[in-house]
């Protein structure tokens, strides 16, 4: 399945999966998708998703380095902004994004077909 998904992403214009490699082992990933746009004089925007670092390799700057590569690619593609969505309670991820220069100035919304994994989804309102 992973190979098929990577092939699908590779075929989607403006998308890529970036990998950080330690020795011969992938230790972190970032998915970048550049989206054509109808506003902002047609300037595209970018989504960054699936920022994941193997637990044994966290705190070594892998995610921040991949974010820098994704950011460079987005700016080179003429994007006017880059968006990252993160769970409300994922403070470690938020610290990484802030350290990489991203600001939490927007509010994101989602509708899910599958159950959310966040602790807040476990609540009974």
Image (tube, helix red, strand yellow):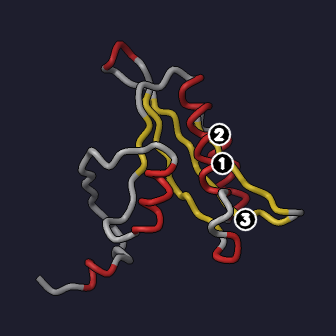
Res. 28 image quadrant: bottom right
Residue position for label 3? 27
Residue position for label 2? 69
Res. 57 image quadrant: bottom right
Q: In the structure shown, which secondary structural element does the residue marked by tag 1 occupy?
A: helix
Q: In the structure shown, which secondary structural element does the residue marked by tag 3 occupy?
A: strand
Residue position for label 1? 65
Task: Answer whether labels 1 and 3 touch (C-beta < 8 Å).
Answer: no
Q: Nearer the viewer, mark 1 or mark 3?
A: 1
Q: Position of residue 69 (x, y in %)?
A: 65, 39
Q: Determine whether 68 is above or below 55 in the image.
A: above
Q: Nearer the viewer, mark 1 or mark 2?
A: 1
Q: Determine whether 122 is above or below 116 in the image.
A: below
Q: In the structure shown, which secondary structural element does the residue marked by tag 2 occupy?
A: helix
Q: Position of residue 111 (x, y in %)?
A: 27, 60
Q: CA distance from mark 1 to mark 3?
A: 12 Å
């Amino acid at each position: 399945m992973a190979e098929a998904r990577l092939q699908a992403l590779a075929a989607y214009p403006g998308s890529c999966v970036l990998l950080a490699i330690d020795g011969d082992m992938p230790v972190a990933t970032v998915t970048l998708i550049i989206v054509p746009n109808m506003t902002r004089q047609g300037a595209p925007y970018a989504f960054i998703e699936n920022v994941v670092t193997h637990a044994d390799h966290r705190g070594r700057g892998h995610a921040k380095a991949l974010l820098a590569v994704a950011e460079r690619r987005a700016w080179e593609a003429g994007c006017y902004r880059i968006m990252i969505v993160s769970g409300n309670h994922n403070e470690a991820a938020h610290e990484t994004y802030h350290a990489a220069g991203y600001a939490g100035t927007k509010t994101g919304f989602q509708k899910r077909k599958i159950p959310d994994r966040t602790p807040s989804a476990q609540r009974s309102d």
